[in-house]
Amino acid sequence: MKKEWTHKIIVSEPWDYKNSDGTNNILGKIAKTFNNEAVLFEAEKEIEFEGHYGKYLLLLSRYKNQDLINDKHSTVGGGLLTDFQESETVTDLESRSFYALIGRLEIND
């Protein structure tokens, strides 16, 4: 049986980020793929950054030619969202997200 929470973000900025478990890791899964450089990440638990709360992060590749879907490790920037609509585009989500983090997206097999 495959685990549901198959991805992890290791937060590097803000450098002092700690989740409710006291680590800088956010467990979750890819909820929607826009392209190889933009995905919607759903966190296992609600997360908080500077008084902003949500379960979703719009993750964008920090470097050209990174493949967020197939690479085991990718450097990303993340915008926090409280929700999303299936019809929303990357531009829609980016315009209403709170830019929250820089980190590394890892695929956990």
Image: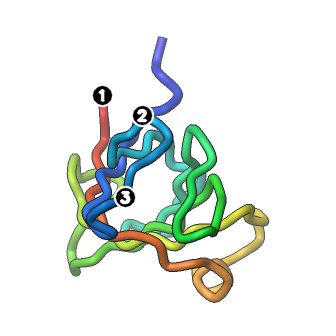
Query: Which residue is under mark 2?
Result: 6
* CB-based contact (under 8 Å), mark 3 and mark 2: no
Q: CA distance from mark 2 to mark 1?
A: 7 Å
- For the C terminus, give its image quadrant: top left
80 vs 66, nearest the viewer: 80
Name the element at disc 3.
loop
**28 up-or-down from 76: above or below:** above
Q: Amino acid at mark 2?
A: Thr
Q: CA distance from mark 1 to mark 3?
A: 25 Å
65 vs 49, nearest the viewer: 49
* CB-based contact (under 8 Å), mark 1 and mark 3: no
Residue 31 lies, in percent from the top left, at 59, 50
Residue sitting at 28 percent across and 46 percent down? 106
Q: CA distance from mark 3 to mark 2?
A: 21 Å
Quarter-of-image position of residue 52: bottom right
Q: Amino acid at mark 1?
A: Asp
Query: Which residue is under mark 3?
Result: 17
